[in-house]
Amino acid sequence: MTKQRETRDRVFDLIDRLGVGEAIPSERQLSAEFGVSRLTVRAALDNLVREGLLVRRRGSGTFVSEPKIAQELTMTSFTEDMRRRGMVPGSRTVELKSQPAGAWLGRILHVSPSDSVVVVKRVRLADHETMAIETLHVRASLVPGLSAADLESHSFYTLLSDRYGIDIVGGLQTIEPTVTNEEESELLGVPLHSPAFLFERTTRSSEGGIVEYVRSIYRGDRYRLVTELNRDVPRR
Ligand code: 16G
């Protein structure tokens, strides 16, 4: 095993033993303890920071990060998802406005360009920590009276079914890597140009119409995507 690999494994063991938020010893201490150069320790730590297992805070040291959320690619809502993990979901409405759909959104939502669309920007929280920014677009006539406060105290999908009688049954989602811009970094409380996932989702109701188009920025340091793979074995 190379020195660097061995060092990485030892730091990995250390992370396993320490709790989230605890500091790991300094590079100098680790290099003395492991009997390797500080350069080797630094390279191993750099990798673990890049993988999201450790986080560096300027002036105070290197700490064990929160484990990433293994996000399955399903049709669930943010609220459901966080509850299922035993976390407390939260939502802060940054903006709610109505505007004409225009050509581009009209095409996505299957409405005419002059139809009114409600656009809601929300910061999604789990256990009071920022996780994502979601910008929801929904035809205004589908959700009369929808307010910013509604979306802070209720799940949108629950409101859709309980208040508006709309059940979401499917949709299409794309995922792309991205980095946060200035506004997103500020809302999420992460450094400028932090890695993130861009999700775009359109959903369909049981009646077949398009219900929402959501553009979401999920923190790359808090999420990884998981899919279950199945393969039909061809018959011989
Ligand atoms: C998820 C969906 C989003 C949906 C929201 C409803 C992704 C990328 N996005 O976050 O499209 O609007 O759930 O959440 O998964 P809510 O019911 O908790 O308001």
Image (cartoon, rainbow, N blue to C red):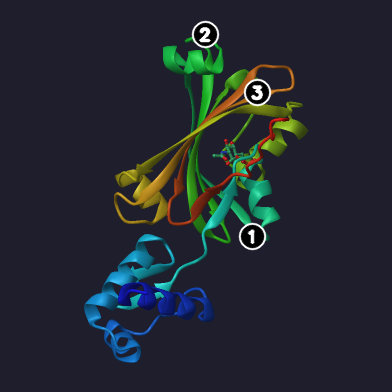
Q: Mark 1 to mark 3: distance in Å?
A: 27 Å
Q: Secondary structure at mark 3?
A: strand
Outermost residue, front side: 236
Q: Mark 3 to mark 2: distance in Å?
A: 18 Å
* Quadrant into which the C terminus falls: top right
Q: Amino acid at mark 2?
A: Ser
Q: Earlier in the sequence, mark 2 or mark 1?
A: 1
Image-quarter location of ligand 1: top right
Circle 1 is placed at which residue position? 87
Q: Which residue lies at the image location 76% right of the left edge and 26% below the top edge?
A: 165
Disc on res. 204: 3
Image vertical order of residue 86 relative to residue 187, above or below = below
Where is residue 175? Give x, y as percent. 47, 36
Q: Secondary structure at mark 1?
A: loop
Mark 3, other Cα within 10 Å: few <14 / some 14–19 / many ≥20: some
Front one among 94 and 34? 34
Image vertical order of residue 104 relative to residue 35, above or below = above
Front one among 210 and 46? 46
Where is residue 234? Give x, y as percent. 69, 31
* Quadrant into which the N terminus falls: bottom left
Q: Which residue lies at the image location 51% right of the left edge and 73% below the top edge?
A: 20
Q: Is mark 2 within 8 Å of ligand 1?
A: no
Disc on res. 223: none
Where is residue 10? Give x, y as percent. 42, 80
Mark 1, other Cα within 10 Å: few <14 / some 14–19 / many ≥20: some
Q: Mark 2 to mark 1: distance in Å?
A: 40 Å
Circle 2 is placed at which residue position? 112
Front one among 151 and 196? 196
Q: Amino acid at mark 1?
A: Met
